[in-house]
Amino acid sequence: MSGVKCISKSIRYGLGVISAAALLTGCGTVEVPIPYGTLDGSTDYALTTNVEQAQIPLFAEKLCAAVADVTENSTVSTETLKAACVYDIDACNVLYSYQANERLSPASLTKIMTALLTLENCPDLDDIITIGDVTIREEGAQNFGFKEGDRISVRDLLYVTLVYSANDGALALAQYVGETQENFAEMMNARAAELGATHTHFVNPHGLTNEEHYTCAYDLYLIFQAAIQQPEFLKIIQTEKYSFSYISAANGEVTKDISTTNQYFLKGYESPDRVTVVGGKTGSTAAAGKCIILYLKSMSGHPYIAVVMGADSFDTLYHSMTQLCNETIE
């Protein structure tokens, strides 16, 4: 299935980012919006009809982008989800896009940025962290149960945060890297701006609901695309089960086993037909609904990223994702 080919490129500009998305229709020039994102999450738009002007050198490589929804030839119901996208990474091709720029609560997909910043700022993952006050009292929140004074390696804490999706694990990483949650949130927003994620504003490292904490499906694609360039991140998101030891302040050395929240790995739901689910991250809160982002590869090794946000149930989440991949990826 052929989608919309496009190029999104960004450069840092002062405290903000100029991000350009050029729809390539085959020839000539087209009028496209260029969002000027700022660190406070606000976005203004200018227009250009010059595709060359929109192709500004980026921090890494070409990225997919689509100005409008790309939903033709898909039978996926959008009534029970808030946003969804499928991107052909190498071809810079948008295979599917529904409300990609809609401001949404990301739940634990936030932890992708937390992990990215940790990997970028901690050269030795075997460093030992002494856990501070990571108490999270929100009812129903997924926590590992760390106590102040516990000691654990950065590497193991990344697994706890990404595989088990522990909120207290994410907070511990934020305190280690940024000293405080507030400082770390500033780092998250600055990094998002660098990546061209202009519809994003973070206030915490875990994704528990806050009206000032939001992103969109397209921005999550940008952040995830940067994260999978990190070999350790890619390794962790492929993990089904993980065993590790840490030093409990109360009980000495403790060994724990954790399992992924990704039901594709646990065989809870049928995987897409023509691609392999390499790995991903899930998220779920009452405000965000059920969310997932996946890194996929075709039988020939061709890479894709797919996102579903705001599904009304886990059944909707996984069935919609599988259907999207089956319909869009050849």
Image: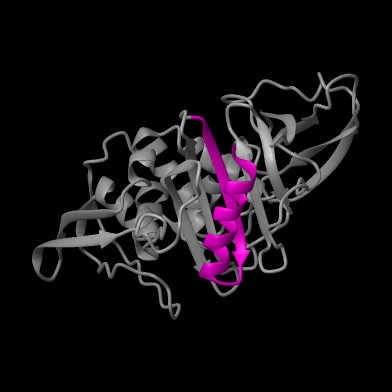
Specify the farthest residue to the bottom.
139
The one nearer the camera, 258 or 219, is: 258
Q: How many marks?
A: 0
Residue 39 is left or right of residue 180, and the answer is right
Residue 293 at x, y percent in the picture: 52, 51
Residue 132 at x, y percent in the picture: 30, 62
Residue at position x 38%, y 39% in the image: 234
Residue at position x 36%, y 33% in the image: 231
Q: Height in image: 53 above or below 32? A: above
Name the image quarter holding residue 170. Answer: bottom left
The one nearer the camera, 226 or 37, is: 226
Residue 88 at x, y percent in the picture: 61, 34
Specify the farthest residue to the left.
252
Residue 222 is left or right of residue 300, and the answer is right
Residue 200 at x, y percent in the picture: 65, 51
Quadrant of the drawing holding the C terminus: top right
Residue at position x 88%, y 22% in the image: 50
Specify whether residue 213 is painted magenta. no
Q: Is residue 230 visible?
A: yes
Specify whether residue 321 is painted magenta. yes
State which region is magenta. Answer: 302-330
The one nearer the camera, 31 or 321, is: 321
Residue at position x 45%, y 49% in the image: 280
Name the image quarter holding residue 24. Answer: top right
